[in-house]
Amino acid sequence: MAEYSPFSPGVAPAEGTTKVRRLVTGVDAEGKSTILLDEVCPHVNVGHGVPTYVSTDLWRTEQSPVDNAAPFRDPLDTEQPLSVGPTPNGTVFRVLELPPDGDWRFDEDGKETTPLAFHTTRSIDYAIVLRGEIWAVLDTTEVRMTAGDVLIQRGTAHAWSNRSDESCLLAFVLIGGTLP
């Protein structure tokens, strides 16, 4: 199975989409905890060619346990192709802003032009709704999630459907794993 990739290189995020501030800690020369990085995260990608469908990758690890004593470097500053899932022993932390389905999946007559993006990742995913609402769509059921709800996605086929009139903001932590 080819890896699922919704990313559209060369498409810029729309004005007004969420900018995520990323702060990273470490230790200074005296071994004291401090902030090493405080910025609007630059690792932003557009999904499905839709400028309001925005993925911000905040951090990625390649193995566990993580070596927090290593010199600081942004693990996303790489020439490696962007992937949705983590490496087998790695993690991905991202924020995803999904526009309403009506803004991009349907034409003005209500006809579906872009089907739901069903996919699986070789990971366990923790999905947290930060703002808005979203439908988690599985093979046999669909469930509406609102701000504060959490889904533990255990490597199964799924898609996301935003049936509201507002964008939905989700946070994801993906940890390398296997498919069921």
Image (cartoon, grey):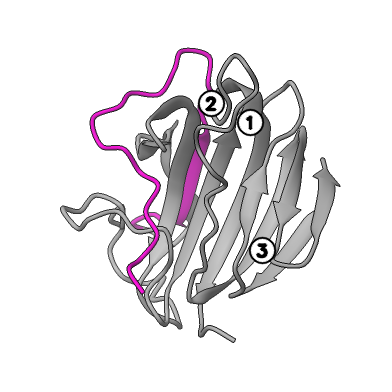
Residue 126 - label: 3
Disc nearest the viewer among 2 and 3: 2
**Residue 7 picture location, percent across and down:** 35, 43
Instruction: Kindly tell me whether residue 149 is visible in this rendering.
Output: no
Q: Report crowding for label 1: few under 14, some 14 to 19, many 20 or more residues within 10 A (C-alpha).
A: some
**Residue 10 picture location, percent across and down:** 23, 30
Above or below: residue 15 compared with residue 51: above
Instruction: Kindly tell me whether residue 48 is visible in this rendering.
Output: yes
Residue at the location (42% across, 74% down)? 90
What's the amino acid at mark 1? Asp
**Residue annotated with mark 1:** 101
What's the amino acid at mark 3? Tyr
SS at circle 1: helix
Above or below: residue 180 compared with residue 141: below
Relative depth, front residue between 22 and 156: 156
Contact between labelled residues 2 and 1, with CB atoms less than 8 Å apart: yes
**Residue 8 picture location, percent across and down:** 31, 38
Residue at the location (37% across, 31% down)? 49
Relative depth, front residue between 37 and 125: 125
How far apart are labels 1 and 2 at the CA level? 6 Å
